[in-house]
Image (spheres, rainbow, N blue to C red):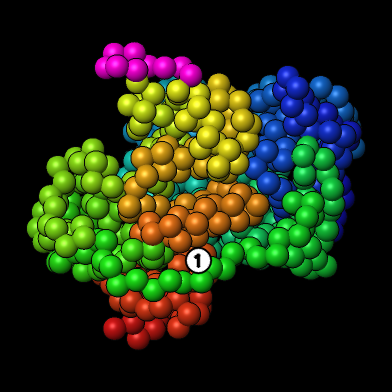
Amino acid sequence: MGKTILEVKNVYKNFGGVKALQDVSLSLKEAEIHALVGENGAGKSTLIKILTGVIKMDEGEIILNGEKTKIENPLSARINGIVAIYQELSLIENLSVAINIFLGHEPIKKIIGWINNKTLMNRASKYLKEFKIETDLNSRISEIGLGEKRIIEILKAMSINAKILLFDEPTTGMSATEIDTLFRIMDKLKKKKIPMFYISHNMEEIFRICDKVTVLRNGRNVGTYKTNAVDHKTLVRTMLGRKIEEEYPKRKLKKSRDILLQTEDFFAKDMLKKINLNLYKGEILGVTGTIGAGKSEIGEAFFAVTKKIEGKLRMKGREINFKAPIDAYKNGIAYIPEDRKTQGLFLNYSIEDNLLITNINKAVIGKLFISSKKKRKFSLDISKKLRIVPLDMTTSALNLSGGNQQKVVIGKWLIGSPEILIMDEPTRGIDVGAKVEVFNLINNLADSGVGIIILSSEFQEVKNICDRIIILRNGEIVKEIDSKDITTEEIFSLSLGAGDGK
């Protein structure tokens, strides 16, 4: 590996009494892709925000190309060539792809000060050709997919002459094909000797694309390894400070033939094809496929987020026609959406407000007054059960780690004791320790008789936590099989249309 481009030395950052970073030191060499891993709350995003000038460190040094450098604000980071690609995109939806690439530094006609559209299009076209991207430059950002949007974010960074790229969970919501495109671009950037930090919870991605990996735990650097000299179990053990005996906890399947939910040629708005399926009492049913296969649309239809068009939906043999989510909820169905931040939580509200939002009646005295004491008791009880951290019920959901945010979303539905729980990408964006806790929770709920539908594009996850699997392709069921009778590779193959399937 080449010369050192960036050094972080003895960095500290506290938020009140919380020690976010403690004496963190690490380096980034040219042409190196360096992963940052750790549980939610380990300090990864805090470090990225310091490097991009979003927040200031309390102590420490940043050394850029051998010189001590102060990064006071985002503009300072940009001047120094440090650019971050976050989960939350910074693109303007109503503007074209070309304009977004050069947003804020568009080529100008010198005499009249207008944007030189011809030059802008020519330069944007060169970027697309260089990285072999086929996106239409005239398309609005709102008209392209999430994967393409992330690629445009990278081109935007290159247009301002980025010298160091910081990726924060860049593959969230991307299909396998889009991830391949992203990694191809990263390989090309490596050849240009551009170094990159890469934050991800996905171990497979880290071993596939990264040269080195640093583990943060409780705000400290607890180990840096070359990826070709370390294994998955060692990284997990270092991240958690303990051994995980079972990443996918086992349970004894208690076979039940009591059907909780049944569909007959069921079809609703936004669904791609009619669906016929059964969900049994105490069963964990996985519905999987690649991004865009139609998983989320099924979950939204069952919870009446979208309107039924034709077919039948039965609960315990009784045909039902929900007009709104409140009808589904009153009939014992709970739905955990894919995007917890925009669909599952009120981020500026407290833990207890989020937990009681669907069950406020439990804290009402008489018919008019809400009991703060009851509200606190119900929220504290469910928080202890789910091991939500911190146990301060006044904490804003915005300030929780991804794993704890997901527990709050789950918790607000569990208070209502649902018979059917639909979970869309339940472990997306949470660390391995939090995943194990969520898996244990799912197992316990199923053991208690709750029927659970897991909508997930994580094939290994579906294989290991579900009792039965339904594989979708273009909205159509191509395989329905017990999880013990299929491999992860076969699930992947069938999802892509490379297997027999029917």
Residue type at mark 1? Ile
Q: Quadrant of the C terminus?
A: bottom left
**Residue 102 in magenta stretch:** no
Query: Which residue is painted at 87% across and 28% down in the image?
Result: 60
Q: Is residue 466 above or below residue 39?
A: below
Question: Can residue 132 be seen from the camera position used here?
Answer: no
Q: Which residue is mark 1?
A: 465
Which is nearer the eye, 349 or 129? 349
Residue 352: where, in percent of width, then height? 49, 26
Q: Is residue 244 above or below residue 220?
A: below
Task: Judge from the rendering whether residue 497 lies leftward or rightward of residue 477; answer left or right.
Answer: right
Q: Local crowd at mark 1 within 10 Å, few (<14), some, or many (≥20)?
A: many
Residue 493 image point, x, y percent: 44, 78
Seen at 46% across and 36% down, the residue is: 341
Residue at figure coordinates x 27%, y 56% from the top left: 298
Q: Residue at x 29, y 13 (%)?
A: 368
Segment colored magenta: 365-373
Q: Is residue 257 visible?
A: yes
Residue 14 x, y percent position in the rendering: 77, 24
Quadrant of the image occupied by residue 23: top right
Tell me the SS state at disc 1.
Answer: helix
Q: Position of residue 399 (x, y in %)?
A: 59, 28
- The quadrant where residue 432 appears: bottom right
